[in-house]
Structures are given as structure tokens and as C-alpha cells.
Amino acid sequence: MQSISGSRFKKLSPAAPLSQFLSKHDASHNSGFITRLDRSPVRSKIITFTKSLALNIGITLFMLAVCALSLFRCHHSNFPPNMVMSLWLTQNALVLSAVAILARSSVVPFFLGECRLRVCYGFRATEIIIQRPAASAMMLPQSQSQGEKEKGYASHNYDAEYQYWRMALHAIHPSRCYAAASALLSPEYWMQEYEVVFDALRSIAAGEFEEDGLEFAIWKQDAKRVWNVCELWRMHEIMSDQQEISFFEAFLTESGKPELLAVWQKMLAPSTMPEKASLREVSSKTYHEVVGKFAQQGLDYETVWSQISEETWRSKSCS
């Protein structure tokens, strides 16, 4: 990959296998992707899937019951036959439209996607998550010239990058996938691009690219058909919200895992040093080490940060 601005923004060579893979699956309007590796404990994945299975079975039974009642019961027998027929057709059209929306947004992708994924691959310690983000999420910050940085634009760009990080964490949170009934048909409810995930697993098994290439990031194809990536997992290099850092430290201490705090601080240490290619490589290795340490303690690193971010925003809203 070729660096664009700092270590977080890069261009992917069109000849790279990962670039060709993304191009094959990108939508016609170049919506791009959000990717991440879910390292949450296997037990939590099983619990989330079980809740999702119960929810979707319940939705399916409910839809069948509503359709049966709508098709075979008529409460307008006192009206003229032509009016009864009109009311019956209108009622059924509304019911079937609602059923179609629920089936398309939840039931069908869950049973044909999630269940098929579990049958084929089971529950793994590290799982690939791929989603197409909203169009507004794909306005990635552009690279800056040295003159712009000297004029003070850098802090504004960092703030924008930080917001993308928050947005992506919220949009692709593993615990919200198919498990929250209250989030149906809302922005809180999302589903994976299962066909893309299946193809990614096949490509990784064939050795075409590494699983780590799909680490937490936003991918967008530019007008020249070149893939740009914002590596969101590197956002911790510019953490500046002291309240958020304090929440994170308090969370680890109260969870009885203070040793993880030292591991996390080790990852931030290179960010205080001059940016060099060798240091970026060390940062990448350190990040994977940190994520692995958190996973060993039953914690998903990015999920923890998502919870901390939401707590910080609630605290600021109340103050």
C-alpha cells in the first residue's frame, strides 16, 4: 500500500489481490465498505446468534399468523360485496408489503446468510465483518499539503477522522447485528454483506490476501478506480479526549484487568515519536498484540472503545 497522509490513509495498488476483490463486489455507485475483524469471545458470538435466531423465528411465526388471519378472515361482511373485496385487497396489500419489508431486511438474510455462515464455518475466534456504509459515511478526508498543516487545518482533519471512527464503530457493532428487536428497520439494525464475506473467506483460504488486510477500516474507490483506505484501527494514535481516556482507564481498572492498561499504553507510545515507515509496521504489530491480549481476557478491543465512546458522549450531553 502507498501512504496518502500520515499512516492512516493509503492507496491500494490496482494490481493487488485485495483491490481486485473489493472492485469485484463494490456497488455500481461505488458505495465502498466498512470492514473489521470481530475478536469478541466465542461465547458472546454464540449468545448473539441464539438471540438472533429466536428473534427471527418469532418474526417468521408472527408474519405467518398475520398473513393467515388477513387472508382467511373478513370483518366487513355487512358491507356490499364490492366494498368488501376492495377492503380485503387493500388490507392484504398493506400486510404483504410489511411482511416483504421484514423478510427482506431480517429473516431472509439471517437464515440464508448468517445461518449458512455458521453451518459452513461455525463460530471462530476471529471473524470477518463487511458492511456497505451509508453514503454520508464515505466522504473521507482528503490528504493535506504541508501548507495546510502549517495553517492549522490538521486538527480539523483529525476531528473529522475521529467522527468517522465513532460512526463506523456504531454502524458495525457486532452486538447490534440481528439481536435488537427494538432496532428493526432503524439505523441501529444492520446486516453483513454475506456473499462478500463468503468470497473473502474463500480468497483468504486460497492465500490471495491476508485476513489482517480486512482490519477495521473504511474503503472507498475514487474516480480513477483506485481504492483508498482509512485505517480506523490506527485512530488511537491521535486520541486527545482526556475524558474518554479516563473512562477507558477506569473501565479496565474496575473490570479487574489493570494489566491491560499497560498493554494499551504501550501501543500509544510510538505515536509520540516521529512518523517513519518502520514505526508504522511496529504500530501494526503492536495493535494486533493489544487486540489479542484483550481477546484473551474475554474483551473485544474495538467494542470496548465503542462503549466508552457512547458513555463519553452521554456524559458530555448531560453536562
Image (cartoon, grey):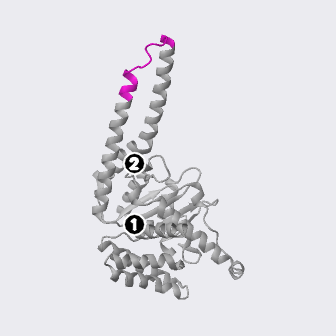
Does any portion of residue 154 appear in the rendered image? yes
The amino acid beneath tag 2 is Ala
The numbered disc on residue 244 is none
Q: Nearer the viewer, residue 220 or 188?
A: 188
Q: Is residue 154 above or below residue 180?
A: below
Image quadrant in which the C terminus is located: bottom right
Say if the magenta span includes residue 83: no
Image coords of residue 58 (percent x, y):
32, 41
Magenta residues, start to end: 67-82
The amino acid beneath tag 1 is Glu
* Element on which disc 1 rests: helix
User: Which residue does the image show at 38% across and 82% down from the upper left?
Assistant: 261
**Which residue bears the numbered disc 1?**
211
| Residue sitting farthest toward the front | 319
Q: Is residue 106 left or right of residue 279?
A: left
Image coords of residue 106 (percent x, y):
41, 45
User: Which residue does the image show at 35% across and 32% down from the upper left?
Assistant: 64
Crowding near pointer 1: few (<14 within 10 Å), some, many (20+)? some
Distance (Cα) linking label 2 and label 1: 31 Å
* Element on which disc 2 rests: helix
User: Which residue does the image show at 48% across and 33% down from the upper left?
Assistant: 97
Image coords of residue 177 (percent x, y):
40, 54
**Which residue bears the numbered disc 2?**
181
| Residue sitting farthest toward the top | 80
Q: Is residue 288 above or below residue 47?
A: below
